[in-house]
Amino acid sequence: MRKQPQQRRSREMVGRIVEAGRAVLAEEGYDACSTNRIAARAGVSPGSLYQYFPDKAAIVAAVIEGWSDETAERVAASLADRVGEPGGIGMVRATIEALLSALEADPELLRVVSEELPMAQHKERRTALERRVRELTAT
């Protein structure tokens, strides 16, 4: 029985760290983002942060994974009511509008992701997002 509250606290701590990482990354950029700044923003000690993430790269990867998932979910939600409509230019336009709208939800993070992050490290997540958009369009 004790494991459930501890697991919940662990998930909450990871969530706080990732949200703090997202905020620091968006506000200060990749180079200025550090584990110490993230820990301070999350209200935890650096030692506590390292219990959940080995380094800055792991936090940034979690931030990008969450952002990619959110973006894909926004696109899917925007297109869900259009499934079954005839394809063509209307569906292409709707897909593009949904993707742009999702990307504009967090413009500062989009700027950091597109301009500052080492792209080779996040190619797999970007490719997964692109694949999901193509699948939604094909549907």
Image (cartoon, grey):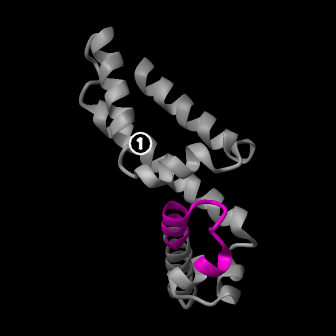
The reply, left or right, for residue 17 in relation to residue 87 is right
The reply, left or right, for residue 35 in relation to residue 138 is right
Q: Nearer the viewer, residue 136 or 71?
A: 71
Answer above or below: position of 62 versus 74: below
Q: Nearer the viewer, residue 52 or 2?
A: 52
Residue 127 x/y as whole percent: 62, 34
Answer above or below: position of 105 versus 39: above
The reply, left or right, for residue 121 in relation to residue 74 is right
Question: Mark 1 sits on what residue?
Answer: 103
Q: Dividing the image into 4 quarters, which one contains the C terminus?
A: top left
Question: Is residue 76 visible in the rendered structure shown here?
Answer: no
> In percent of the image, x 40 and y 52: which residue is there?
106
The reply, left or right, for residue 35 in relation to residue 20 is right
Answer above or below: position of 65 versus 77: below
Residue 47 quadrant: bottom right
Residue 103 x/y as whole percent: 41, 42
Q: Is residue 118 located in the magenta-colored stretch of the structure?
A: no
Answer above or below: position of 18 versus 133: below
Q: Which of 7 and 132 is in front in this view?
A: 132
Residue 5 x/y as whole percent: 50, 86
- Magenta part of the protein: which range? 20-37
Question: Is residue 104 visible in the rendered structure shown here?
Answer: yes
The tally of labels here is 1
Q: Is residue 27 located in the magenta-colored stretch of the structure?
A: yes
> In percent of the image, x 50 and y 61: which residue is there?
26
> In percent of the image, x 56 and y 59: which residue is there?
63
Amino acid type of the residue tagged 1 in the rendering: Leu
Residue 110 x/y as whole percent: 49, 47
Magenta residues: mostly which secondary structure? helix
